[in-house]
Image (cartoon, grey):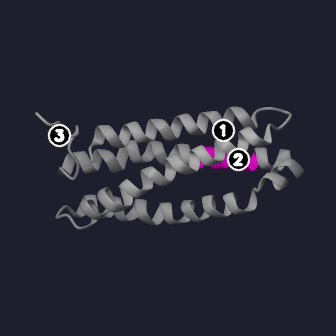
Amino acid sequence: MSYERLIAEHALIDAALARLEALVAAAVPDIPAVIIGLADLSNELAHHLAHEDSFIYPRLIQGRNPQARRVAERFVEDFDELRGAWNLYLREWTSDCIAGDWEIFRIETGTMIVRLAQRVKAENALLYAEALRTGAVPLRDQRAA
């Protein structure tokens, strides 16, 4: 796992957020496309979080650098709330609910998109920079020679 790979995964999440944002900008819903957009974003998030939860956070929290530990612990705490909100959002917004209340779905989705995009930006600027600075992650993946 490298800084380069983590940033690439964030780019995929950002792209999924942009696709979902474009879908909810429509006045008339395309429910199947929205469901696919939500599934794509969920898959990107799950894939990425598996890497963070198993690699980045343990290395920073168990490392010797107290500043890195504090940064990682704060990110873990903050994300616990966001993860709960995301899971609740996904449970509540079924295809029937989306079709039945498109305007509220658009508002709540817009809010969730902003929260997730802010999280990605904060991880890029703070968490990954700290992981790179402390040596918890290399800049690039090691390539087979």
Q: Earlier in the sequence, mark 1 or mark 3?
A: 1
Q: Please name the amino acid that badge 2 sits on.
A: Thr
Q: Is residue 74 left or right of residue 90?
A: left
Q: Determine which of the numbered discs, if any, sits on residue 20 in the image.
A: 1
Residue 82 part of the magenta-drawn span: no
Q: Determine which of the numbered discs, if any, sits on residue 109 in the image.
A: 2
Residue interval drawn in magenta? 107-115
| CA separation in Å, label 2 and label 3 | 38 Å
> Which residue is rendered at x = 47% and y = 45% of the image?
120
Per the image, the residue denoted by label 3 is 142
Up-down relation of residue 88 to residue 44 (above or below)? below
> Which residue is rendered at x = 50% and y = 46% of the image?
44
Q: Determine which of the numbered discs, if any, sits on residue 1 in the image.
A: none
> Which residue is rendered at x = 48% and y = 62% of the image?
78
| CA separation in Å, label 1 and label 3 | 34 Å
How many marks can you see? Answer: 3
Q: Please name the amino acid that badge 3 sits on.
A: Gln
Q: Residues within 10 Å of mark 3 (few under 14, many from 20)?
A: few
Marks 2 & 1, CB-CB < 8 Å contact: yes
Up-down relation of residue 53 to residue 117 (above or below)? below
Q: In which quadrant is the C terminus drawn?
A: top left
Q: Is residue 95 left or right of residue 7?
A: right
Q: Earlier in the sequence, mark 2 or mark 1?
A: 1
> Which residue is rendered at x = 43% and y = 55% of the image?
49
Residue 111 part of the magenta-drawn span: yes
Residue 42 in picture, x, y percent from top left: 57, 51
Residue 128 in picture, x, y percent from top left: 32, 47
Q: Earlier in the sequence, mark 2 or mark 3?
A: 2
Q: Please name the amino acid that badge 1 sits on.
A: Leu
